[in-house]
Image: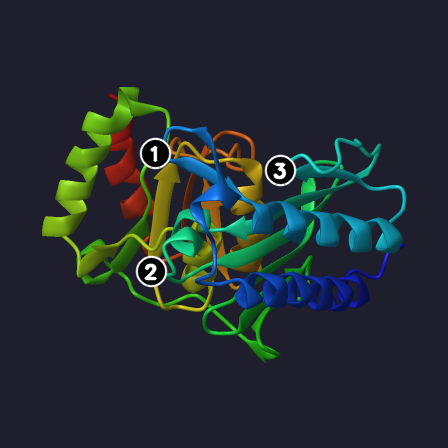
Amino acid sequence: MMNYKELTNSVIKISKDAGQLIRNNFGNINSDKIQSKGLNDYVTEIDKSSEELIVKQLSKLVPEAGFIAEEGTSTKIGKDYNWIIDPLDGTTNFIHGIYPCAVSIALEYRNDIVLGVVYEIGLDECFYAWKDGGAYLNESPIKVSKTAKVKNSLIATGFPYHEFDRLDNYIDLLKYFTKNSKGVRRLGSAATDIAYVACGRFDAFYEYDLKPYDVAAGSIILSEAGGINADFLGKSNYIFGKEIISSNLVIYDEFLKIIEKFMSI
């Protein structure tokens, strides 16, 4: 049986090594080092270098594991274990010299996320969790908020890069939360957003047009901190289903009903 606590500690070091690489180049990216992967979707040499560092080190930890990695450094598929990696979540922020930017690493075992690390570089904050082990921020246990009503909640979200067919409904939902909550924030890093829900800074998060590496690590941190993740229908297809809501347990039912009302149209 794999020791997920020890493995998580090793992944923390790797995420911080990658974070240091990113930090060393923060504010020093020239336009010739940036490539476009599509509308509003960019990659830099630092994304690629960070992923190469991460894949190399993770391959030593669990040699049989495969990879689902944003920049495609490795396309190996593992029979049981697969790492899910975003080497620089918040690339657009990084390009413009603003935080947050994060390294996000999760391990999947037979379709179950068993550990996750989100290292936010700007504040030097490492959020992490392993299955049945609780959630932590820089070695201190964390829990979701106890906010009981959406009207008293601070909510985080993001905006789609490609799938604009649902955008009108999404903007209507944003208008609703703007008028009926304490406020809405858009940080530009989904991994960081979910980690902030896990430690109680935000009460809830929702977004669509996402990839597995945007949410995998954050999702286990959130659940181990006492929160709940779901897709927009309240089902469990949030890792590969391209949409997620993450919240504390108290407001979940109300939060989900609001999202269903606007996004199921």
**Label 1 sits on residue:** 160
Mark 1, mark 2: which one is toward the viewer? 1
| Foreground of the two, 125 or 87 | 87
Q: CA distance from mark 1 to mark 2?
A: 21 Å
* Label 3 environment density (alpha carbons within 10 Å; few <14, some 14–19, many ≥20): some
SS at mark 3 in the image: loop
SS at mark 2 in the image: loop
Q: Amino acid at mark 1?
A: Pro
Q: Earlier in the sequence, mark 1 or mark 2?
A: 1
Q: Amino acid at mark 3?
A: Glu
**Label 3 sits on residue:** 71
Q: CA distance from mark 3 to mark 1?
A: 19 Å
Q: Which residue is at a point 56% across and 76% down the rendered structure image?
A: 141
Q: Which residue is at a point 48% across and 69% down the rendered structure image?
A: 143
Mark 2 near mark 3, Cβ–Cβ under 8 Å? no
Mark 2, mark 3: which one is toward the viewer? 3
How far across and down, in percent of the image, does residue 208 sit? 38, 34
Mark 1 near mark 2, Cβ–Cβ under 8 Å? no
Q: Amino acid at mark 2?
A: Asp
**Label 2 sits on residue:** 203
Mark 3, mark 1: which one is toward the viewer? 3
Q: Is residue 87 visible?
A: no
Q: Which residue is at a point 61% across and 68% down the rendered structure image?
A: 20
Q: Is residue 137 visible?
A: yes
How far across and down, in percent of the image, does residue 195 sit? 47, 60
Q: Earlier in the sequence, mark 3 or mark 1?
A: 3
Q: Quadrant of residue 24?
A: bottom right
Q: Is residue 33 left or right of residue 193?
A: right
